[in-house]
Amino acid sequence: MCAVRAKDLIAAHGHGHGHGPSEPASRPVRKLLLVLLLPLVLATAVGVLLLYPFGHEQRTGAAAGLAQVPVRGDVTATAKGGCGPESTDPGATGCVLVTVRMSDGAASGREVRIPVPDQPGTPTFAVGDAVVLSFGGGNPNDSTSYQLADFQRDVPLLLLAVLFAAAVLLLGRWQGLAALGALVLSFVVLVLFVLPAILAGESPLTVAVVGAGLIMFIVLYLTHGLSARTSTAVVGTLVSLALIGVLGALFSAFGKLTGLDPETANLVSLLGHGIDTRGLLLAGTIIGALGVLDDVTVTQTSAVWELRRANPSLGFRDLYAAGSRIGRDHLASVVNTLVMAYAGAALPLLLAFSLSGRTLGEILTAQEVAQEVVRTLVGSIGLVAAVPITTALAAWVAGREPIPTADTPDPTPSEPTPRPTRVSGDLRTGYDPAKGPWRRPPTGPAAPAATRSRRARPARGGSDD
C-alpha cells in the first residue's frame, strides 16, 4: 500500500461545486499558485491589522446624539380620534389612537395612548400587534414621551432564517453546512471589521478591498476546499475586484459623484468627523459585487477543470475557447441578476423620480440615480471581465497539470477454460450409455405393441374421431 502525504490530501480535496474529487495538484502547479496567492494573503492579513481600530471607542446611542430608546410593547386597542390635545374629544378625527401596553422600559406594564396620523402612507395597527415605541426621555408615564416607531419582526425573521438553513442543509448536506458557516463568518467580518474601521475614520474603499479579500478567502476555501481549482478562482476574483475598484474610482470622480444621499448625510452628522462619502459609495459597490463574482469565478474554474479531465489532450487554447463558450451562457444571466438587484433596491427612488416630470436623461444623471447606475455598470464590467480572466487563469493552471494516465493492471493468469465434453445419449428419451449401444426402435408391423400404441396415441386434447 502506498503512503499518502498530507499535502496530497489537501490538494486532492474536491472542489465542491457539484463535481467529484479533483486530481491532486502537481508540484509545479502548487508552487505556481503559492507564488500568486502568498503575497495576496499576506497583504490581506497586514491590511486587517493596520486598519482595525484597536483602542478606538465608538460613541453610540445617547453619546452619539441618538436620544431615542426603543421600548417594546403590544397593541391592546385602537380607536378613531384627534391628533392634538383634544384627541379624545367626541367627533375628533385625523388620527388613530393606538393603545400600547409596554413590556420593557422604565414603565413596563403600563399602557400609553399614542396618536398616529390617519393617512394613506401610515401603517395600519391592529389589536395584538407587537410594536416598538421610541422613548425620547422625560416622564416615562407620559404618553407624549413616546412615538410609535415600528413593528417587532423577531419571530418572522427567525422562522425565515430557519427555513433557509433547512433548505440549504437538505440540498447541500455537508457542503451546505460549510456554506452556512461561511455566510456567518462573512457577517462577522462585516460587523467586527468593516463597520468599525469605517466608523473610526479609515478609508472606506481601502477597508472594503481588505474586507472583501478576507471574506473571499474564508468563503471560497471553507465552502469549496483547499484545492488548485479554488485557488485559481480566488486569483480570478481578486483581479476582477481590483478592476471594479479602479473603474469605480475613475468614473465616480469623472461623474462628480459625491455619495451624499440623505442617509449618508445623516451618518456624517452623527459621526462628528469627516468621512469619504465617495469611498463609501465605492465600498458598497465592491462588497455588493463580491457574491456574484464568487459564483462566476468558481463556475468557470470548475468548467475548465472538468474539460481537462474529460479530454486530457486539450491545451491552453482549446481549454480557453471551450471555457469561454460556457462562460458566455452564464454571463448573460449573471449580469441581468446584478442589474435587477440594484434596480430593485432603488425602486422607490426610481418611482419618486418618475413622478417629478423630468426626462429620462435628467432622471438617470441625478445624483441619487447616477450613483446606482455607476454601481451597476462598474459591477457588470467586472463580471464580464471575470469570465475571460478566470478562464485564462484556469486554462493556464490546468494545462500545466500532468495528463492522467489510466493504470491498466496486468491480466491475472487463470486456468484454461475446459472444452465442453461431448454429450452422448438420447436427450429426448434420457438414454444412458452405460446400458449398451443405442439402437433405433423398430417401426412398422415389427414394432412392439407398446411402441405402436404409444405412437398411435392421439395428441392431448385431441379426438379419436
Image (spheres, rainbow, N blue to C red):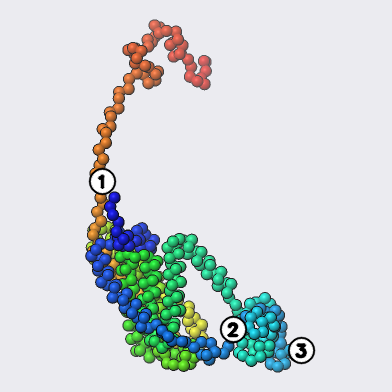
Q: Nearer the viewer, mark 1 or mark 3?
A: 1
Where is residue 410? Give x, y as percent. Answer: 24, 44
Farthest residue to the right: give it: 90
* Secondary structure of the residue carrying numbered label 3: loop
446 displayed left or right of 70 = left
* Secondary structure of the residue carrying numbered label 1: loop
Residue placed most toward the observer, 141 or 167: 141
Residue for badge 1:
409
Q: Which mark is residue 90?
A: 3
Residue under the image location 69 percent in, 83 percent down: 110
Q: Nearer the viewer, mark 1 or mark 2?
A: 2
- Between the C-alphas of marks 1 and 3, the distance is 98 Å
Q: Amino acid at mark 2?
A: Pro
Residue under the image location 34 percent in, 89 percent down: 254
* Disc on the earlier residue, 1 or 3: 3
Q: Amino acid at mark 3?
A: Pro
